[in-house]
Amino acid sequence: MKDTAKHQGLRNQLVTLLKEKGITDKGVLEAISKIPRHLFLNSSFADYAYQDKAFPIGAGQTISQPYTVAFQSQLLEVKKDHKILEIGTGSGYQTAVLCLMGAKVFSVERQNELFKQTSALLPKLEIGIRPKHLSFGDGYKGLPNHAPFDSIIVTAGAPIIPQALMAQLKIGGRLVIPLGEDVQIMTLLIRKNETQFEKHEFGDFKFVPLLENKN
Ligand code: SAH
């Protein structure tokens, strides 16, 4: 499927909407204005790709709503060459946003079907992802071999903050995680030192659950 002038027009409208909803980070808005979200969806949903909505992507999972992707990306305060860990690759759309912002992204997915699908798609998009940085596994464990990270983003609703993720964050690093069972509170932890984390909360969001120990 191609990326056309019509798609670009729809992306520009989406960016305008995200600005109206309060997204201000220029890097986030620019990435969203460039990434062909219709390529991350099953073709039956492609016509709706630039609506600010979540859609099914297979294996009972969803591609996050663009506003949620933008909100989480903005909380990360991404700088060029930041090393970022993403838990829940899913469609790879959030991964692509962070890559286009200049980050070096590592991403973990626990559904093999999605891992395979997204590992095939992302390298075709020229966003600078390294295929070996995509892995199939349990995100509760993080990626100790590649730690520490400048920031960590969890894109599924977590009942608790996984200890391993806190341990893999640099001092000064940011962990963005939706916390809760049915509805999640978007939570930002900033690591102050070896033992202390500052916590900020940003209201309710709705995610598919972060599932434990399935691999
Ligand atoms: N960023 C993705 C969000 C997909 S939904 C996107 O916008 O497309 C959340 C994803 O987290 C799903 O793909 C789900 O399979 C994955 N997930 C759930 N529990 C996980 C775990 N323990 N480890 C890694 N990935 C997990």
Image (cartoon, rainbow, N blue to C red):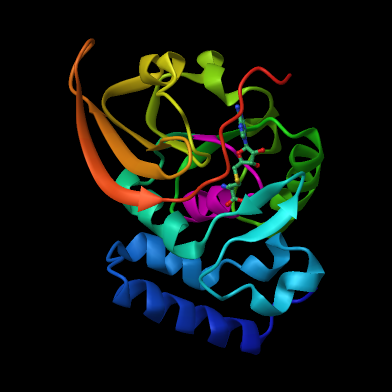
Horizontally, is 178 left or right of 104 in the view?
left
The range drawn in magenta is: 86-100
- In reply to whether residue 94 is colored magenta, the answer given is yes
Horizontally, is 118 left or right of 69 in the view?
right
Above or below, 208 relative to 139:
below
Please tell me which residue lies in front, 54 or 24.
54
Please tell me which residue lies in front, 7 or 212.
212
Q: Quadrant of residue 8?
A: bottom right
Please tell me which residue lies in front, 209 or 130.
209
Q: Quadrant of residue 39?
A: bottom right
For the C terminus, the quadrant is top right
For the N terminus, the quadrant is bottom right
- In reply to whether residue 156 is colored magenta, the answer given is no
Point out the residue furthest to the front here.
182
Q: Quadrant of residue 212?
A: top right
Residue at 47 percent of width and 84 percent of height: 13
Residue at 80 percent of width and 70 percent of height: 43
